[in-house]
């Protein structure tokens, strides 16, 4: 009994939790993660583009000036 407690027999391993021999799920998850990352980067770039305004940019052609002489 002492030997059984001190040196238990080899544990049997069960089936793998994520059994995917061809890697299909991994490819799908990688593609989905890449797509989500690309969409987030595009949204961030669009937000920065909208929020950024160059104070020294020239006025667009045909823009009316709002100077009034009083």
Image (cartoon, rainbow, N blue to C red):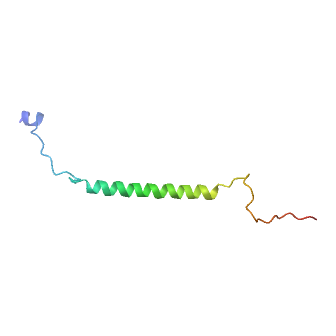
**On-image quarter of the C terminus:** bottom right
Residue at image position (55%, 55%) is: 45
Q: Position of residue 65 (x, y in %)?
A: 81, 64
Q: How many marks?
A: 0
Residue at image position (59%, 55%) is: 48
Q: Of all residues shown, which one is farthest toward the right? A: 70
Q: From the viewer's perspective, tell me whether residue 29 is left or right of residue 69.
A: left
Residue at image position (12%, 43%) is: 11
In terms of image quadrants, where is residue 5? top left
- In the image, is residue 9 above or below residue 39? above
Q: Position of residue 39 (x, y in %)?
A: 47, 58
Residue at image position (54%, 55%) is: 44
Q: Position of residue 30 (x, y in %)?
A: 35, 54
Q: Nearer the viewer, residue 64 or 45?
A: 64
**On-image quarter of the N terminus:** top left
Q: Position of residue 51 (x, y in %)?
A: 63, 57
Q: Of all residues shown, which one is farthest toward the left? A: 1
Q: From the viewer's perspective, tell me whether residue 15 is left or right of residue 25.
A: left
Q: From the viewer's perspective, tell me whether residue 29 is left or right of residue 50.
A: left
Q: From the viewer's perspective, tell me whether residue 44 is left or right of residue 34.
A: right
């Amino acid at each position: 009994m002492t030997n059984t407690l001190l040196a238990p027999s080899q544990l049997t391993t069960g089936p793998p939790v994520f059994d995917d021999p061809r890697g299909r799920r991994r490819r799908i998850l990688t593609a989905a993660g890449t797509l989500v990352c690309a969409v987030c980067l595009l949204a961030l770039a669009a937000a920065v583009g909208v929020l950024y305004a160059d104070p020294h940019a020239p006025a667009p052609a045909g823009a009316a000036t709002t100077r009034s002489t009083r």
